[in-house]
Amino acid sequence: MMKQIKILILGAGLLACGLLRAADYDVRAFGAVGDGVFLNSRTIQHAIDHIHAHGGGRLVFYPGTYVTGSFYLKSNVTLHLEEGATLLGSVNPWDYVKDPVVGWKAMIFAVRQENIGITGKGIIDGRGFTTANNLLKYIHKGLFDDPLKYDRPSETNRPENIYFRECTRVIIQDITLKDPASWNQTYDQCRDVLVERIRTDSKSYWNNDGIDIVDCDGVVIRDSYFDAADDAICFKSHADDAICRNVTVDNCTARSSASALKFGTASRGGFVNFKVTNLTCYDTYRSAITFAAVDGGRIEDILVDGVRSVNTGNVIYLRIGNRRNSGRTPVLRNVTIRNVYAEVPFNKPDAGYSYEGPVEDNPRNISPASIVGLPGMRIENVTLENIEMVYPGRGDSLYAKVGLTDRELDAIPEMEQSYPEFSQFKELPAWGLYVRHADGIRLRNVTFRAQEGDYRPAVVLDDVHGATFDGVSIREPGARDKKQIFPYKSSNINIR
């Protein structure tokens, strides 16, 4: 994997050097107007077409506010936004096209292009709240056909800021991406993608993911900040015959009213060979780390190394499901998560943000980290190492209870077709870690710390075969001789 990453970084560096040597073109020379009023979509497209036809180069946006709808980036062209330059999304939904290949709307498209980029200290501002609500008005008037799930337009009918599909050698560097009407930026079936030093602010409307990497091969995301109403750093697999692979994420910060780092939910092909290092999460409603193999794909050979998560509703959620498997058996195995410090609050962690996670999804007692497979679709070979998880405790059996009797444990539903979130089971019988239908679970130097007492044990294992607890510390005020590791229908459990 490291050899592949070095090649990718070298390739990205060569691409950057090549783009720097290419000619610069002033977007204003083509008639663009940065007054915040004039619609520049056709002007920008003409400029890109010209540069592409003449061997490539940079289309430079100097300080100003350039209103635009949809346009297409083409091979060997880079958009360069100088500091003080803003690409401002039109608030008229009719100014955006729905690309026939990707089936989504966006401000900036690229489809089957190479050697492309967006660089500079400027801003891409989708004005998504206003655009989405304008679209909603047209739908209610019967002028636009949309299913209006939850009284909001479909994600595909609201423009993203960026959607690149099947592109090779892509650089996204230094820019700020804010206020999309849908997901912020999607890189779909692309190869050799470098995203670095960017800042995203995606809190303007529903489904505002920070970044979505879909079935790509060779991606580096580093030194970047993601603040999102939905998942912050999200990997997806949309095609049964494709896979997302060879990806590194380093030195990033994520805040989300969903999950900070998520694999899935769309997981048809899968995710292989990932390395995530130095991740900071805060004020996140759902999980710091979520891996969801629920559509027949595979998640394997994943390393997460170095996470600091504070004020986050859940630390780790690993899940196999049977949602849209098409007869295939999903795989989740060979996962290592290490060097983690995490604090889970008692109260709602994203309270006060523009689009909060739904309060009705919360269980009544704080949920533990969870590793949950299915009968016949088991999670395999997971290592948790050098981890400290701090919980509030305060689980109240008189308020909501799942106990440790056979009947109570067997009554926890499998929910194999449900949308995978840590809170989907509501109450669980552990306050620290719950593991079900899994083999080969290893905990080394793991501390579970409750700030107040809880009626539940720290760890519950249900149908787990082969688990090692080496240097595990459990701290709960007033617990005394309480049994903190409870195995049920499990075997080969070694506690050292």
Image (spheres, helix red, strand yellow):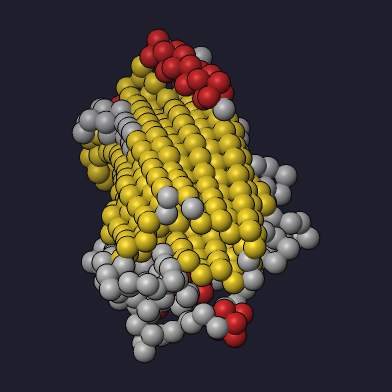
Q: Residue at x 52, y 35 (%)?
A: 247
Q: Hey, which residue is sitting farthest right in the picture? A: 327
Residue 238 x %, y %? 63, 50
Near-viewer residue (125 or 215): 215
Q: Hey, which residue is sitting farthest bottom in the picture? A: 398
Residue 268 x %, y %? 66, 52
Q: Residue at x 48, y 82 (%)?
A: 402
Q: Quadrant of residue 117?
A: top left
Image quadrant occupied by the N terminus: top right
Q: Is residue 92 left or right of residue 468?
A: left
Near-viewer residue (418 or 391): 391
Q: Residue at x 36, y 19 (%)?
A: 25
Residue 417 x %, y %? 64, 70
Near-viewer residue (39 or 192): 192
* 139 shown above or below 81: below
* 4 shown above or below 23: below
Q: Hey, which residue is sitting farthest top in the picture? A: 21
* 332 shown above or below 398: above
Near-viewer residue (98 or 458): 458
Count the marks.
0
Q: Quadrant of residue 315?
A: bottom left
Q: Is residue 431 left or right of residue 380?
A: left
The answer to whether one can see residue 150 in this image is no
Residue 21 x %, y %? 40, 10
Q: Residue at x 37, y 67 (%)?
A: 357
The answer to whether one can see residue 311 in this image is yes
